[in-house]
Amino acid sequence: MAIKQLMISKKIEQRKSSLTELLIQGEGLKTRSAELEKALEEAKTDEEIAAVEEEVNKLEGEQTDFDEKKGKLEGEISELEGELEKLNANEPKNDPAPVKPIGSERSKKIKGDERTMVRGKFFAGMTREVVQNLIEREDVKEFLTRTREIMKEKRSVTGGELGIPTVFLDILRDTLNTYSKLISKVNFKPVAGKARQNIAGTIPEGIWTEAYGKLNELNILFNQVEVDGYKVGGFIAVPNALLEDSDLDLASEIMYSIGQAIGLALDKAILYGTGTKMPVGIVKRLAETTKPAYWGDNEKTWTDLHTSNLLLIDPAANTDVLFYKDLIIKLGKAKANYSNGGKFWCMSSNTKATLAAKALTINAAGAIVTGQSNTMPIVGGDIVELDFIPDNVIIGGYGSLYLLVERAGATMAQSTDVKFIEDQTVFKGTARYDGRPVIGEGFVALNISQDTGATAPSATAVTFVADTANA
């Protein structure tokens, strides 16, 4: 490699190292923000509120400085990588030596291109340099070392908590966003205790009168929805041989499995949750025919939505155009009041394929095209594929009208006692959430099946894995 390319590579390495250090500082800003939010909730006097406000102003200044530095470093890295790519394009092409997979001891000796992307489950999409910096952090090393030490000790470990480093908790959240497809679509709020969502009543109409007449009193009522927190999680058994592999394999398998399990359960609860030891799902709220027990005293008047928002496509819509006309009308039953306007529509992959087939057209060039990709035609809103939803059922509406609160982030613990003779370590993962549709009128569930005997919709509940441990 020419000296100029080596020099550019060194600059890229230096700036990436600086960016990694800066991102670690950013995690500290997030922690302080959460602490200040909690302090504000606990503040009672004007002096306490003023003290918190002063700290918030300081934090905002530091956050602005952080964003500027981050943007500058990212811009410099992008510019340098582009310059290096142009220089490399003019170099003669040679077949590179095969690189050993990440996770083996031999791979640690390879000094390849730091920009090579890792192909693991949990670390997919990260560069080697970022992953290596992550694993070499002191708090991460301590976490992994404690895990191995417990494995080597021939004694029972009862409920020994592993404190997960903050950097791992943040990455676990990213994985959760990947496998929980709905957490980014709804109104997600991390809270320290019970959460209360205040709702202003319907805007009253002003009253006309004479120019010199008395004003009439207007009436506006505030309501409140309260949510708590329920535990979701489980445990997995990890072979000890896996724990004896590289740090990358250990962290990847633990985080990947827990993130996917919690994320799947969370998505299902947002749509179909029963409200018993879990959030209230959208379909659960729409299917209610009587006021439920969870409805609070301070909430607005309960309304029966099972006929207005649980819908069936018109069987007489026997052409694709008529089908989509009726589809648009039925999905339009979701009311945007109180929302920020963002919509989402959940369905199985088979249902999405059915909609795409009905939206097929032939363009001027004679090619077959569809008016649907990952967005609902005409109506708008992202399409989210979730295959636990029955075929031909579409569930969705205005996501900001579903309140999802996180009482506690993911925590882990491990024991060598349960699977001792099987030479396995058991890891458990838990998180605490609650949620419910704040305004049920903002959602609909639609059955697009035109078969004889179809109901609206075909199913108002799905099966959750039984809580056999507490039966």
Image: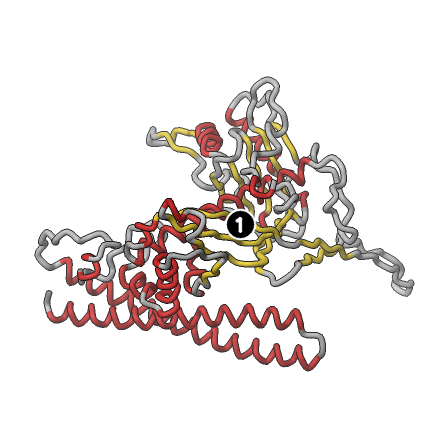
Using residue 215 as the reference point, say whether residue 159 is left or right of it. left
Q: Amino acid at mark 1?
A: Lys
381 w.r.t. 164: above or below: above
Residue 340 position within the rendered picture, expressed as x and y whole percent measured from the top left: 60, 53
Q: Position of residue 335 (x, y in %)?
A: 65, 44
At x 52%, y 53%, the residue is 430
Q: Quick one: quadrant of the C terminus?
A: top right
Q: Mark 1 — residue?
A: 185
Q: Residues within 10 Å of mark 1 (few under 14, many from 20)?
A: some
The total of numbered circles placed on residues is 1
Q: Secondary structure at mark 1?
A: loop
| Lateral position of residue 21 relative to residue 60, left or right | left
Residue depicted at x 29% and y 71%: 15
Q: Quadrant of residue 129?
A: bottom left
Q: Quadrant of the N terminus?
A: bottom left
Q: Is residue 173 shown to the viewer in this render?
A: no
